[in-house]
Image (cartoon, rainbow, N blue to C red):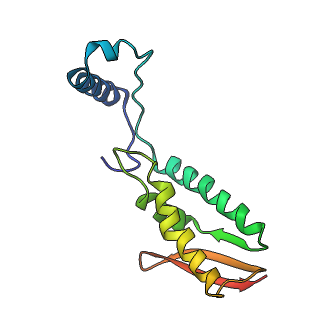
Amino acid sequence: RELGSGDSEEAHKKMKAAVLDLVQSHFRPEFINRLDEQVVFHALQKSQIHAIAKIQISYLQKRLNEQSMQLEVSNQALDLLGQAGFDPVYGARPLKRAIQQQLENPLAQKIIAGEIVTGDRIAVDVENGALLFRCMPV
């Protein structure tokens, strides 16, 4: 299913019925009866993935601020990370890994290499479908 497509109530009801049928065919009634409730969530929208990416990146920004470094991530970069970290089956769970691999690891390598130092402002944008890092003294 395409990221950002809306869920109609009818489509959600059909999906819920299909999921519950699948659960009942794979698990014994004894197990299912031990569950208090079965919840089927609506698919995440693009704006929700964007918001989750912002929250995850805010933790990185806080850690960098403690080192007197500023991190600014463009909306395009957030969208790119959101697309890389979204899976229709797992939702936003892979997002943290995508942020680590595409944002945190390259930043760490640049800090270790001395390309980013205390007092720098790091701007992250997208160029040719990849994250672009620009470092400037504050």
User: Measured along the vertical axis of the image, is residue 8 above or below residue 68?
Assistant: above
User: Measured along the vertical axis of the image, is residue 66 above or below residue 17?
Assistant: below
User: Measured along the vertical axis of the image, is residue 7 above or below residue 93?
Assistant: above
- Identified at 65% across, 62% down, the residue is 60
Which quarter of the figure has residue 91?
A: top left
Residue found at the far left of this picture? 25
Percent x, y for residue 117?
72, 83
Which quarter of the figure has residue 125?
A: bottom right
| Direction from residue 92 to residue 63 in the image, left or right | right
- Identified at 73% across, 72% down, the residue is 70
- Identified at 41% across, 53% down, the residue is 86
User: Measured along the vertical axis of the image, is residue 93 above or below residue 114?
Assistant: above
Percent x, y for residue 133?
58, 80
Q: How many marks?
A: 0
Q: Nearer the viewer, residue 106 or 20?
A: 106
| Direction from residue 117 to residue 18 in the image, left or right | left
Q: Nearer the viewer, residue 123 or 112?
A: 112
Percent x, y for residue 4?
41, 48
| Direction from residue 110 to residue 34 in the image, left or right | left
Percent x, y for residue 124?
59, 74
Quarter of the picture containing the C terminus is: bottom right
